[in-house]
Amino acid sequence: MTNLGLPERLPRISVVTPSYNQVRFIEQTIQSVLSQNYPGLEYFVIDGGSTDGTLDVLRRYSDCLIWVSERDKGQANAINKGLRMASGEIVAYLNADDMYEANALFQVGNYFANHTEAMWITGQCHNIDEQGRIIRRGISWYKNFWLRVGSYATLQVLNFIAQPATFWRRCLLEKLGYLDESLNYTMDYEYWLRIGRVYPIHRLHSPLARFRIHSTSKSGQTSYNQFDEELLVARRYGKGIPILLHQMHRFLTVQVYSHYFRQGRLTKVWL
């Protein structure tokens, strides 16, 4: 394991994985977290009462993570449960079908240790398919471009921040609150707008995570609903030209998705 020039003291990092019937992928997710070998890792899996064999997987890792399984009120509620249990200085959540890249947590811990002014950071993220193959390279390039040059005003127009590759200091939960549990798809985008209004984002220009697109994922099934909710969230934090541009960007994005839906090729967008 490369130490990446680590300082003597790395911050404790708490990672929360919300889970519900993701037995196909959750072990890969767990292994991607535990294989980081990060010395100050605290890992929670908050399961919503899975019935597909997920609990058998969790039992196998009981010595390496903390898990609970009980009915919840949705994804944001499950994440908030885990965040309230967390004791780490740095927190993040990783969905049960996504993965971390090797050394991701060391990069994050090292950055926070050396940049005490940073309240949150994000990095690049690959899109992968059910078999773990990298897809949608054009979309990744587009988001990485805005990650490099975008501002808070840009964030009001489009969400260029990759949720699995984003980490923040736990003290922000006390200052700004937890995820909005009324949102079904864009609780992350709302939280980035909430933080970004107060604190500048710090960026790591290297891949930290992999976001999986598959037939049963929320992103794969409900893209249009997500776009509608994103617009509602953007209107909470902006008005005027940024919201007009957000609407234009949303229209163009919907046209692209509609084109590929009609051709039955949505999972192959911009390979």
Image (cartoon, rainbow, N blue to C red):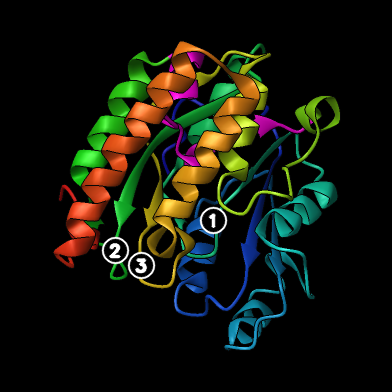
Tag 2–tag 3 contact (CB < 8 Å): yes
Q: Is residue 13 left or right of residue 85?
A: left
At 66% from the left and 20% from the top, the residue drawn is 119
At 37% from the left and 36% from the top, the residue drawn is 250
Of the residues shown, which amino acid type is indicated by label 2? Asp
Residue 123, magenta (yes or no): no
Q: Within 10 angstroms of label 1, few (less than 14), some, or many (20 or more) residues?
A: many
**Mark-to-mark CA distance, 1 and 3:** 21 Å
Q: Is residue 154 above or below residue 94?
A: above
Between 205 and 13, the one nearer to me in the picture: 205
Query: Which residue has dot 3 on it?
Result: 214
Mark positioned earlier in the residue sequence (2 or 3) = 2
Q: Within 10 angstroms of label 2, few (less than 14), some, or many (20 or more) residues?
A: some
Q: Position of residue 90 (x, y in %)?
A: 69, 35
Mark linked to residue 103: none
Residue 232 position by quadrant: top right
Q: Within 10 angstroms of label 3, few (less than 14), some, or many (20 or more) residues?
A: some
Which portion, as a residue range, is magenta?
151-170
Mark linked to residue 129: 2
**Mark-to-mark CA distance, 2 and 3:** 6 Å
Q: Position of residue 199 (x, y in %)?
A: 65, 14
Q: Position of residue 155 (x, y in %)?
A: 47, 23
Between 236 and 270, the one nearer to me in the picture: 236
Query: Which residue has dot 1 on it?
Result: 33
Query: Disc 1 on helix, strand or loop?
Result: helix
At 79% from the left and 33% from the top, the residue drawn is 173
**Mark-to-mark CA distance, 1 and 2:** 19 Å
